[in-house]
Amino acid sequence: MKTGVLCIHGFTGGPYELQPFVDFLKVNTDWKIVVPTLPGHGEILSLNKLSAENWMMAAEQTLRQLQKDVEQVYVIGFSMGGVIALYLANRYPICKLVLLSAAAKYIYPTQLLQDIREIAKEAMAGKLEDNQLYQLYRDKWKSTPIQAAFEFMRLVRIVEPYYGQITIPVCLVQGKKDGIVPYTTAQFLFNQMDNEKKELIYSETGKHHICYSEDCKDWFNKALQFLKEKEEKG
């Protein structure tokens, strides 16, 4: 059976957020993997006048195209992409979901402040350029319109009522040191879902960009095992 995988990146991000996991899947499977760039996203942001619907529809169109080429589809969503993945799973025949640092609750300001404090300490110590979080968000903080952030929060509100309707197998991966989405969000999502087959994997060292965590190879293998497992019959 020919398998396709749709990977969806996060808010203000791009395919690079999922790249290490995508590379791992390409080495270990023969699946057709697509990683679209959502409107206004990528290396250079252009988020003015874009809405939650623009991002959901772009993912939807890519999914429809992929479904024409394969017999079964898995969807992997990172951060906001995890919320879009849940939206798609409620509307289309998808076999399995993998949700990475899924932003199923709003960005958590307290934990974000902790990361900002960490950045401030490193700035005082002259290590700021070495801080991965700083490098990723340095330019984004300047180029993200506040309206786009509201659209991201609106997207979460649109999809949240349907979390409990997801019945397909789901694997959630969450870093315990996530400074953007509180790590308790994964447990919240896990509890909301009524599926018979669901897994929750924690990365002890993982921050928000979970595909770049020190222990990523551990959870890469577990997530791949989850995807490769044949669904139980009956």
Image: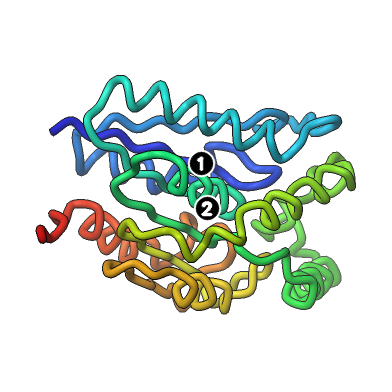
N-term mark: 2 or 1? 1
Residue 209 found in image quarter: bottom right
Three-letter code, disc 1: Ile
Query: Is residue 130 in view?
Result: no
Quarter of the image with the C terminus in it: bottom left
Q: Is residue 233 left or right of residue 222?
A: left
Q: Residue 143 appears at what percent x and percent y?
A: 85, 39
Contact between labelled residues 1 and 2, with CB atoms less than 8 Å apart: yes
- Say if 113 sits above or below 40 in the image: below
Comparing 169 with 32, the one in front is 169
- Secondary structure under the numbered disc 1 in the rendered image: strand
In this picture, residue 131 sits left or right of residue 68 = right
Disc 2 element: helix
Q: CA distance from mark 2 to mark 1?
A: 7 Å
Q: How is the image coloured?
A: rainbow
Residue for point 21% across, 58% down = 225
- Quadrant assignment, res 159: bottom right
Residue farthest to the left? 233
Q: Is residue 52 left or right of residue 203?
A: right
Q: Residue at x 42, y 58 (%)?
A: 166
Graded by Cα atoms within 10 Å as few (under 14), some (14 to 19) or many (20 or more), the crowding at tag 1 reads many
Please name the residue shown 75% across and 74% down the image: 118
Percent from the top left, x then y, of residue 208? Answer: 59, 63
Q: Is residue 42 above or below residue 170?
A: above
Residue lying at 83% horizontally and 50% vertically, measured from the top left: 150
Q: Local crowd at mark 2 within 10 Å, few (<14), some, or many (≥20)?
A: many
Q: Is residue 228 above or below residue 110?
A: above
Residue 82 image label: 2
- Which residue is denoted by mark 1 in the rendering? 8
